[in-house]
Amino acid sequence: MRNKIERYVIVTPEGNIKALPFDSTDKGVLEKLQKEIGGFIEGVTLDFDYLPWTGKVECYVNEEGINLKLPVNPYFKQEMPFPVLGNVIVRSK
């Protein structure tokens, strides 16, 4: 059984959504994801509330969001004591 190809969409705190021009088969995908996030990435599962999409999604966030004082991204929620900050990359298969 082959692995599914992951594609990525970035959601900014301002509500802009953009499909990224690469997928999980591209060389240097980690570096490309880090560039879009603006630093080191951390994989998390978040609740996404941006119609027409709602529900739990697998995402990447900037793991230094608090230290970098990134703005709150109001379109995502998590069951942790701190908000989701900065750009979020949503993984889709």
Image: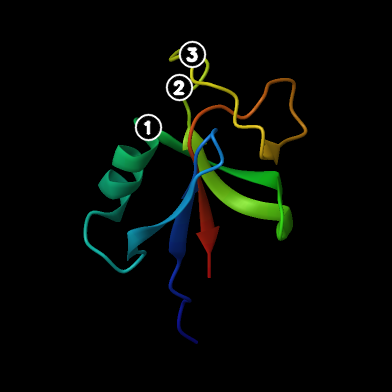
Marks 1,2: beta carbons within 8 A: yes
Mark 3: few/some/many CA within 10 Å (<14, 14-19, 20+): few
| Residue 9 against residue 79 in the figure, above or below | below
Residue closest to the eye, 90 or 52: 52
Label 1 sits on residue: 40
| Residue 47 against residue 4 in the figure, above or below | above
Dot 2 falls on a residue whose secondary structure is loop
> Which residue sits at x=28%, y=48%?
32
Q: Residue furthest bottom?
A: 1
Q: Along the polypeptide, which appears first: circle 3 or circle 1?
A: 1
Label 3 sits on residue: 69
Q: In this view, does 37 lie to the left or right of 43?
A: left
| Residue 22 against residue 79 in the figure, above or below | below
Dot 3 falls on a residue whose secondary structure is loop
Q: Residue 10, how many percent across, how many down?
A: 46, 48
Amino acid identity at mark 3: Lys
